[in-house]
Amino acid sequence: MSVKVPAARTRVGKYELGKTIGEGSFAKVKVAKNVQTGDVVAIKILDRDQVLRHKMVEQVLIINANLLSTSVLSLSVPWE
């Protein structure tokens, strides 16, 4: 009899990352769960090195800010 051990979930701050729901040249979008509140969110994870290498910081911030005028309810932008 084999016992399946659940895979360890990656955590970023207070969020536990789930499956990838979107992917582009500089980023991935993953489903995540706030481990404190249980809220489920989508997190966009940027490849920082590529963004900096291509001098895209301002463009990325402008695009993300424009998302607020569509179907995004709130936007949090931590940059580590």
Image: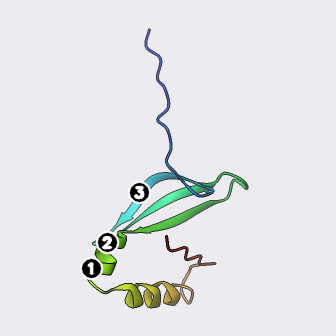
- The circle on residue 20 is 3
Q: Which of 79 and 35 is in front in this view?
A: 79
Q: What element carries label 3?
A: strand
**From what the image shows, is residue 67 above or below residue 21?**
below
Q: Can you give x and y, in whole percent of width and height, for residue 57 in the image?
A: 39, 85
Q: Nearer the viewer, residue 77 or 68?
A: 77
Inter-mark Cα distance, 3 to 1: 24 Å
Residue position for label 1: 53
- The circle on residue 75 is none
Q: In which quarter of the image is the N terminus?
A: top left
Residue position for label 2: 49
Q: Is residue 1 left or right of residue 37?
A: left
Q: Can you give x and y, in whole percent of width and height, for residue 34 in the image?
A: 65, 56
**Mark positioned earlier in the residue sequence (2 or 3):** 3
Q: In this view, does 3 lie to the left or right of 75?
A: left
**From what the image shows, is residue 4 above or below residue 7?**
above
**Mark positioned earlier in the residue sequence (3 or 1):** 3
Res. 22 in view: yes
Q: Is mark 1 on a helix, strand or loop?
A: helix
